[in-house]
Amino acid sequence: MKLISKTLAAASLATVAMAAAPAAAQVSGNMGVVSAPAAIAATNARATAYQQISTTYASQIQQIQQKQQQAQALLVQLDTNSDGQLDQAEQQAAQNAPQAQQIQTLERETAQLSNQVDLARIYAVEQILMQYGAALETVVQQDNLQIVLSPDAVQYSVPAANVTQKVVNALNARVPSVQITPPQEWQPSQQTVNAYQQIQQILMVAAARQQQAAQQQQQPASNGR
């Protein structure tokens, strides 16, 4: 998405987690492990906001799906050998084909529609992210933590060290709901866009796992028939 590719931050949310807590590598004591994007993704406010956005932007989402299907149908026309991909010869031939211009138009229109949906989601994420530091500080004080690390910075830890769910609970208390309509001229920060991308990745992985689990449950039933 153009919005994301232009503003994607290189920094990880791990830096937010470490900055919000009084952590230092040389300090000994209680250690907590927390995934900031996973915590935000698991909040009630994020889930509710995404549901509201799906309803509010139902027309845009439907148009996106339709335009993607149209673009895919045009790509099939350019796949002259029907192998499911465009080889070099097909790509060269496609440059002068009318389908190529139609695909580019559909992609631009899809990007414009997607940006509307993305901005609403990013705005919702930003409101939760703004309270993340305070929520983490609450958990730090409750558990008397002296070190807080992100999962990718830890080679091993006991399950009890993972305080992500505690941060989720603290966020739910601080941010029960968020707005989904960005103010005019509002633009997200790089940090917010980075958080949004990580959250989207988490949700995609979770959805894929749910789909795989559903398929595995159906297989024994099908085999038993």
Image (tube, helix red, strand yellow):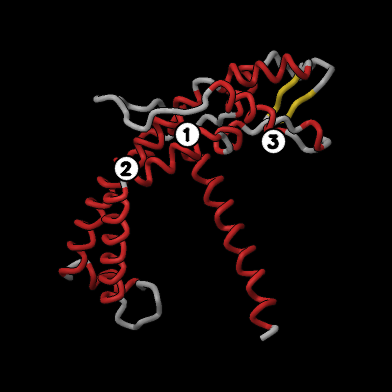
Name the amino acid, label 3.
Answer: Pro
Q: Which residue is mark 2?
A: 56
Task: Using the numbered discs, state the Cα–Cα distance from disc 3 to disc 1 in whole angstroms.
Answer: 17 Å
Q: Residues within 10 Å of mark 3 (few under 14, many from 20)?
A: some
Please provide percent x and percent y for residue 30: 82, 21
Q: Nearer the viewer, residue 180 or 100?
A: 180
90 relative to 212, above or below: below
Q: Secondary structure at mark 2?
A: helix
Sequence-first tag of 3 and 1: 3
222 relative to 104, above or below: below
Name the amino acid, label 1.
Answer: Asn
Name the side, left or right, on which 4 lies relative to 163: left
Which residue is drawn at the image coordinates 70% and 20% (left, top)?
Answer: 139
211 relative to 77, above or below: above
Please provide percent x and percent y for residue 210: 60, 58
69 relative to 34, above or below: below
Q: Secondary structure at mark 3?
A: helix
Please provide percent x and percent y for residue 223: 68, 83
- Considering the image in quadrants, where does the C terminus appear? bottom right
Name the amino acid, label 2.
Answer: Thr
Q: Quadrant of residue 189?
A: top left
Q: Which residue is mark 3?
A: 151
Which residue is drawn at the image coordinates 18% and 70% (left, top)?
Answer: 97
The label on residue 194 is 1
